[in-house]
């Protein structure tokens, strides 16, 4: 996982999104689906990966939104 990736995780009864390397959550939601959608949108906008964690902190899934580089 790289600096700047967006992580969706559960903490203190809330689903949160945080940019890797940041200290605070960028947004919170009581509902997982809302947090995942917001995290995905942020990752797309930033062109980074979106990492979704389960309630225990393990990585559930990861989607890469980085632009592809062409091989020459």
Image (cartoon, rainbow, N blue to C red):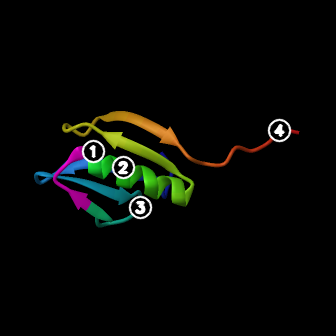
Within-10-Å neighbours for mark 4: few <14, some 14–19, many 20+: few
Q: Which residue is mark 2?
A: 37
- Residue at (44%, 37%) from the top-left corner? 62
Q: Are marks 2 and 1 in contact (CB under 8 Å)?
A: yes
Determine which quarter of the picture holds residue 60: top left
Q: Secondary structure at mark 1?
A: helix
- Of the residues tagged 3 and 1, which is closer to the observer? 1
Q: Is residue 53 above or below residue 34?
A: above
Numbered circle sitting on residue 21:
3
Q: Which residue is mark 1?
A: 33
Numbered circle sitting on residue 71:
4
Q: Secondary structure at mark 3?
A: loop
- Residue at (39%, 34%) from the top-left corner? 61
Q: Secondary structure at mark 2?
A: helix
In the image, which residues are magenta? Answer: 28-32
Q: Position of residue 2 (x, y in %)?
A: 51, 50
Q: CA distance from mark 2 to mark 1?
A: 6 Å
Name the side, left or right, on which 51 lies relative to 25: right
Q: CA distance from mark 2 to mark 4?
A: 32 Å
- Residue at (25%, 36%) from the top-left corner? 54
Q: Position of residue 16 (x, y in %)?
A: 26, 55
- Residue at (88%, 39%) from the top-left corner? 72
Q: Is residue 17 above or below residue 57?
A: below
């Amino acid at each position: 996982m790289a600096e700047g990736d967006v992580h969706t995780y559960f903490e203190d009864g809330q689903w949160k999104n945080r940019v890797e390397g940041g200290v605070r959550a960028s947004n919170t939601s009581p509902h997982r689906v809302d947090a995942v959608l917001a995290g995905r949108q942020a990752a797309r906008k930033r062109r980074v990966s979106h990492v979704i964690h389960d309630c225990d902190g393990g990585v559930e899934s990861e989607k890469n939104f980085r632009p592809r580089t062409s091989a020459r």
